[in-house]
Image: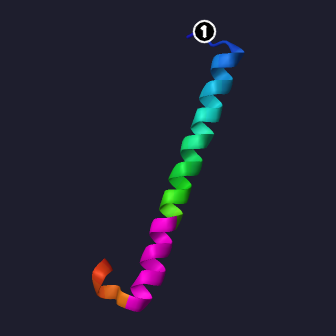
Amino acid sequence: MNMTPDAIAIMVSGFFIMATLNYKREYVRINTIIYGGITNGRDYQ
């Protein structure tokens, strides 16, 4: 597979964007479980 530098740069930047979005979503979900579980744990079980 012949990759130009432009294609590599686009793939790498796209990968980092997806990883960042996934990290933020997981971070919010984990915080919701942790902090929400303190106040009303029955909703998260």
Q: Residue furthest right?
A: 5
Q: Is residue 21 magenta?
A: no
Q: Is residue 27 visible?
A: yes
Say if 13 sits above or below 9 in the image.
below
Q: Measured from the top left, where is residue 45 in percent x and y?
A: 28, 80
Residue 29, x across and y down, in percent: 45, 67
- Front residue of 1 and 7: 7
User: Horizontal placement of 43 versus 9: left or right?
Assistant: left
Please identify the residue farthest to the bottom as the structure is shown: 39
Give, as a single range, the part of the protein colored magenta: 28-39
Q: Is residue 19 placed above or below 42 in the rendered structure?
A: above
Overall secondary structure of the magenta stretch? helix
**Helix or strand or loop: what does disc 1 sit on?**
loop
Instruction: Pick whichever, 33 or 1, lies toward us.
Output: 33
Q: Residue at the location (65% across, 34% down)? A: 13
The image's colouring method is rainbow
From what the image shows, is residue 25 above or below residue 36? above
Q: Name the residue tied to disc 1.
A: 2
User: Callout 1 environment at 10 Å: few (<14), some (14 to 19), or many (20+)?
Assistant: few
Q: Position of residue 23 (x, y in %)?
A: 55, 56
Residue 39 in the image: above or below residue 23: below
Q: In the rendered view, does 27 fall on the left or right side of 39?
A: right
Query: Residue 42's x, y, as percent?
Result: 28, 86
The residue drawn where x is 55% and y is 58% is 24
Quarter that holds the N terminus: top right
- For the question of whether residue 45 can be seen, the reply is no
- For the point 59% across and 49% down, which residue is it? 20
Callout 1 amino acid? Asn
Q: Residue at x 62, y 41 (%)?
A: 16
